[in-house]
Amino acid sequence: MARGEGAEQYAAVLLPIKPIHTEIKTAKPKDQRNRLTVWNKLCYAVGGAPYQITGSALGFFLQIYLLDVAQLDPFHASIILFVGRAWDAVTDPTVGFLVSRSRWTGIGRMMPWILCSTPFAVLTYFLIWYVPPFEQGKVLWYLVFYCLFQSMQTCFHVPYSALTMFITNDQKERDSATAYRMMVEVLGTVLGTAIQGQIVGGATNCPTEPDELNGRNSTNTSRVPLDETKQAYLIASGVICIIYVLCAAVLFLGVKEQKENGRKKTLLTFRQGLWLVMSYGPYIKLVIGFLFTSLAFMLLEGNFALFITYSLGHRKDFQNILLVIMLSGTLTIPWWQWFLTRFGKKKAVYFGITWAVPFMILIVCIKSNLIISYLVSVAAGVSVAAAFLLPWSMLPDVVDDFKVKNPDIHGYEALFYSFYVFFIKFASGVSLGISTLSLKFAGYVTGSCSQPEAVSLTLKVLVSPVPVVLIAVGLLILRTYPIDEERRQGNRKLLQEMRDSESETSALGSSV
């Protein structure tokens, strides 16, 4: 990228002398400017890890932490989960709007948001996993710091997501960078699951043997292990905070944000931005389709730790089963990138998302068996990888399609990303709130080492039938998504012609 900018300067100097050869001289540097090195892609990808590391830790463990460690009532836990996610969803379009109106600085337009939000995100994340030494106001403690963290995380992730459009203009390079990003992000979920699970998994205040579980003295000795569990959660959160800061530093040092020369940013009000995004058909179909499929996987994620612990009875192994799912997803990301390149993104969606359905059904139909649970986890991870990769790989295509249809509107990229995240997070908050309330109605006992049969049945419903129905609805909606491979390639050619025309106009203006 830096080499390309230098080449443009030399081309502008030579233009008045040899105008006939200007196009030949500028073609090669322009291609070089659009290409990203492996180092650039890796540094860009590392920037996506904090969102997934913290997201997987919160997604898999926050519910069980609030219920069994902080020992909140399920109703209060549901309020925290729903309000926190809903607040997070509302902040996304707000931050997206503010980012779209941000001015260019010496380090870019997106990067200041990322850097300034990092220290506050780290602090608030750590405090989420701290159990305050008071009972009155404990619910308010978690609600405030969960909402604050989500706000700071939004200030990091929305600009980072929109950065995809500003690291290069080339579609293939963006797709390649997105594949790197998804590989690292799924690896981030592995890290979040592994760090949180392995540190916390060894600290449990419940006995694992049936005789101990039914013993009368088990509750009398639970005080010391509970304190150890609280400490384990703090240690895990501290490790994750350090990784968060390191990833932000790598992103800043290894990625250069590309300024769009020759374009004047379109200033939009919030209402105009909302209408701009919500009135564009392909975007709405893509978002609603992935809204249902993502909701299915989020519902599974939010309840899976409880399901493994109380329905399958694998209390000692739940963190390892979660880790296997994430490892399987990480290893299959390159394969999905090859698949969507070879067969197209829509086919990858149908095949990849559907792959999880048989295993969701199998895990609740068979008798509890540890080996089968691990095998199902490996297979389910393959579909998790597709669910991670495909939405973020297809969003740039929608932005490009909009750009072709509306060539006079610029500076709106963050809005498309932020409103997508808004819908996903809001739906996630609703699902977590409803699922936690369902556990309360089923008779969930806070702090207990065993739960009623109604709780086990409720968890089975939340991790299998409901996600399967949501996946089916989402895939039916995605069938109407109009941007196929032919249209995508056509947009790519049209955008390249537009960029070539703008570069020539800019070069001629510089020579005058």
Image: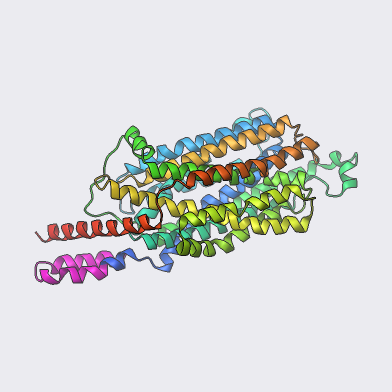
Q: Is residue 183 above or below residue 203?
A: below
**Quadrant of res 177:** bottom left
Residue 48 visible? The answer is: no
State which region is magenta: 1-29
In the foreground, 367 or 183? 367
Magenta region includes residue 266: no
Q: Is residue 145 above or below residue 159?
A: above
Identify the coloring: rainbow
Q: Residue at x 32, y 57 (%)?
A: 490
The N terminus is located in which quarter?
bottom left
Residue 463 in the figure: left or right of residue 25: right
x and y percentages locating residue 254 in the rendered image: 41, 62
In the foreground, 478 or 228? 478
Residue 438 in the figure: left or right of residue 247: right
**Quadrant of res 370:** bottom right
- Report the number of discs: 0
Q: Is residue 109 above or below residue 76?
A: below
x and y percentages locating residue 26 in the rendered image: 21, 68
Magenta span: chief secondary structure:
helix
Residue 435 in the figure: left or right of residue 1: right
x and y percentages locating residue 362 in the rendered image: 71, 51
The C terminus is located in which quarter?
bottom left
Residue 491 visible? The answer is: yes
**Quadrant of res 355:** bottom right
In the foreground, 332 or 196? 332
Q: Residue at x 61, y 48 (%)?
A: 57
In the foreground, 432 or 231? 432
Magenta region includes residue 6: yes
x and y percentages locating residue 440 in the rendered image: 71, 31
